[in-house]
Amino acid sequence: MANHDCETCKFRATYDNNPKSFSGRIWRWHAGWCPGWKSYITSLPDEDRIKLANKYNMDKYK
């Protein structure tokens, strides 16, 4: 499995700490179309992918 920066993304951490912050909302919008995020989340085992999809309300990855 490739190493993805998504695992340690500071913007993702901002969203996790405060989803309504400006930076957090930018990350969530960005993650909706980012090819790197798509590659990262689809490379995860099904159980982990579904957990993240539920956490970030991303139906297309469930």
Image (cartoon, grey):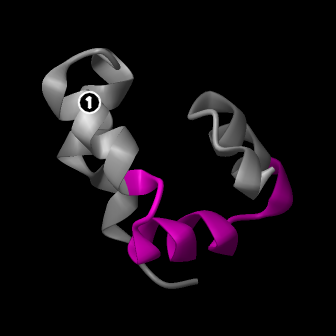
Q: Amino acid at mark 1?
A: Gly
Which quadrant of the structure image shows residue 17?
Answer: top left
Instruction: Give the left or right position of residue 44, taking residue 14 as reference.
Output: right
**Where residue 60 sits in the image (x, y, percent)?**
73, 55
Residue 55, compared with residue 21, is above or below; it is below
Residue 42 falls within the magenta-colored stretch:
yes
The residue located at (26%, 30%) in the rendering is 24
Say which quadrant the N terminus sits in. Answer: bottom right
Nearest the eye: 61 or 16: 61
**Where residue 52 sits in the image (x, y, percent)?**
63, 42
The residue located at (16%, 32%) in the rendering is 23
State the SS at label 1.
helix
Residue 10, compared with residue 4, is above or below; it is above
Q: Magenta: predominant secondary structure element?
A: helix
The residue located at (77%, 64%) in the rendering is 45
From which residue to which does the magenta span run? 31-47
Work out which residue is located at the far bottom of the displayed protein and give it.
Answer: 2
Which quadrant of the structure image shows residue 51?
Answer: top right
Residue 15, compared with residue 31, is above or below; it is above
Residue 31, compared with residue 56, is above or below; it is below
Nearest the eye: 26 or 14: 26
Residue 28 falls within the magenta-colored stretch:
no
User: Dot 1 corresponds to which residue?
Assistant: 24
- The tally of labels here is 1
**Where residue 40 sits in the image (x, y, percent)?**
52, 69
Instruction: Give the left or right position of residue 27, taking residue 38 as reference.
Output: left
The residue located at (60%, 63%) in the rendering is 41
Near mark 1 (Cα within 10 A), the count class, few <14, some 14-19 or many ≥20, is many
